[in-house]
Structure formats: C-alpha cells, structure tokens
Image: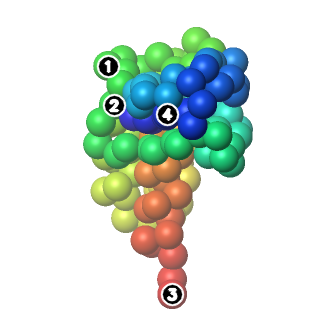
Amino acid sequence: MIRISAVQDGFRRCGVAHPAGATDYPDDRFTRKELEILQAEPMLMVQVIEGESGLGGGQGGGGKTYPMNAKDTAEKIKAAGSIEEVDELAKDDERAGVIAAAEKRRKELAPE
C-alpha cells in the first residue's frame, strides 16, 4: 500500500490532487517512475507500507494483468533464495509494493 499526504492540501502531482490528510493507494496505482517522482517531491510525504495490499486481484495500473496480486508477489519475493529468483518474480512488474519488496530482498541477498 502507498500512503501519501501533501504539505499543502490539493497539491497536484502525477495527475492526482493530494489532500493534506493521509490517503492510501493500492500498490499498483502508480508506475515505478511515478512513485520515484512522488517520493522526490518535497511537498509530499510518501510511505510504501509492506504487508498491506490495496488491491485484491491481479489487475495493475493501465489495465496490465499480473499472475498474482501485489501482496502475494511481494511475499514470494521475500522468500526468494537468490537474486535471480527475485529478478524473475519482479520481471516487468511496475507495482510499487512489488518493486519495493524486490529492491529490499536484493539488498538482503547481495554479498557483503
């Protein structure tokens, strides 16, 4: 789940008027690029919350269909035993929660 609140009520970014109060979005609401833009914006507070999925099915942003919902994909990534397995699970997936889980697991599996 992605939680966003704006410093100024109604601040617009990535086609959304963000309210001052926290608003929750499904993991796949924003593409990877949009999430990067939102996270870099000083007028917004953006949290990627793992373990909660705002989407029950496998439908992603832009009508893209995924074999599993974002929460299930993120759980499989967390259990992956190799970076190659993480890469295969996250391949072509643009959902923010999946991207965040893959990046975290890659760091955990990387040799020190």
Image quadrant where residue 108 sits: bottom left
Q: Is there a contact, CB below 8 Å, between mark 2 and mark 1?
A: yes
Query: Quick check: 86 above or below 14?
Result: below
Badge 1 element: loop
Q: Which residue is mark 4?
A: 5
- In the rendered structure, which disc, 4 or 2, sits on the residue that comes first in sequence? 4
Which of the two residues, 15 or 70, is positioned nearer the viewer here?
15
Which residue is pictured at 50% across the width and 28% down the height?
20
> What residue type is disc 2 on?
Ser
Residue 112: mark in rendering: 3
Q: Is residue 56 left or right of residue 63?
A: left
Gap in angstroms between the C-alphas marked 4 and 3: 36 Å
Q: Which residue is mark 1?
A: 56
> What residue type is disc 4 on?
Ser
> What residue type is disc 3 on?
Glu
> What residue type is disc 1 on?
Gly
Gap in angstroms between the C-alphas marked 4 and 2: 18 Å
Q: Is residue 38 left or right of residue 105?
A: right
- The mark tally for this picture is 4
Which of the two residues, 40 or 107, is positioned nearer the viewer here?
40
- In the rendered structure, which disc, 4 or 3, sits on the residue that comes first in sequence? 4
Expressed as whole percent of the image width and height from the top left, the position of residue 80 reads 37, 58
Badge 4 element: strand
